[in-house]
Image (cartoon, helix red, strand yellow):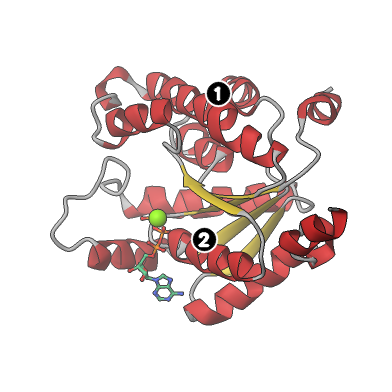
Amino acid sequence: MHADLEELVSPTKGLFVTFEGGEGAGKSTQMRLLADSLSGRGYDVLTTREPGGSLGAEAVRHVLLSGAAESFGVRMEAILFAAARSDHVEEVIRPALQQGRIVLCDRFMDSSRVYQGVTGNLEPGFVETLERVAVNGVVPDRTIIFDLPAEAGLERARRRSLNVDPDRFEKEQLETHEKRREAFLDIAEADPERCRVVDATLPPEVIAAEVLRLVEALLPGDGEPQSSRVEAAS
Ligand SMILES: Nc1ncnc2c1ncn2[C@@H]1O[C@H](COP(=O)(O)OP(=O)(O)OP(=O)(O)O)[C@@H](O)[C@H]1O
Ligand SMILES: [Mg+2]
């Protein structure tokens, strides 16, 4: 049923890649590096992030990351994440994919599965329903999961933001972060077609080469730059 729905509403053009994993794993760093190398090859790349990425979703991002919604409970937070994701998908991601662009997104539905579902202890059915409504068929073609011991990730995140207070999610216990690491690995194992795991302890340039390799096979036109495809067509 889910697969049929995806076939009906999934954009047929473009490529959707998501970057997932715990705090400080290198998602944002690697998304930038991949965007640079793909743009350098002539691809039309859009980078975006969650929560946020669209006007409506950025408004909700502040409510979520400041912790303003925390006291209302994890269900409320999960619904807000879903509301933000829905706006992001419909206003930004789907239109870009329909135009044939490559969309790189820093966190997406797997973060909700892990943060609200697993470590938020929400019932799987509730999380699945929210996900279905929010993504509305726009499922990533490839998800790269950055795997790093929780302690190392937290240390990196701390060093990066020495003078900034930790956000609502960074404040949580190390044990919770380890649980999330396992949950991301479980997702990868359950969906090997979509997901790839990379060792995030490696040097950034080594990871970047691996990330490019993992995306390369899926590039529109088998890696042929879009600009030349457009020229060839006209
Ligand atoms: N492979 C790496 N080895 C060592 N340090 C790294 C590596 N990749 C990124 N870093 C550093 O670790 C910190 C966190 O990286 P980055 O912001 O990319 O992680 P993130 O997964 O986006 O984190 P967050 O979830 O907090 O947004 C940065 O200071 C970055 O320079
Ligand atoms: Mg980041």
Residue 210 placement: quadrant? bottom right
Q: Is residue 86 visible?
A: yes
154 w.r.t. 166: above or below = below
Residue 194 coordinates in the image, percent (x, y): 74, 50
Q: How far apart are the alpha carbons under marks 1 and 2?
A: 31 Å
Q: What residue did someone put label 2 on?
A: 31
> Residue at 54% of width from left, 41% of height from top?
108
Q: Is mark 2 within 8 Å of ligand 1?
A: yes
Residue 183 coordinates in the image, percent (x, y): 56, 48
In the picture provided, is 129 more to the left or to the right than 223? left
Q: Quadrant of ligand 2?
A: bottom left
Pick the residue in front: 66 or 33. Answer: 33
- Label 2, residues with CA under 10 Å away: few <14, some 14-19, many ≥20: many
Can you tell which mark lies on residue 102? none
92 w.r.t. 197: above or below = above
In the picture provided, is 47 more to the left or to the right than 9? left
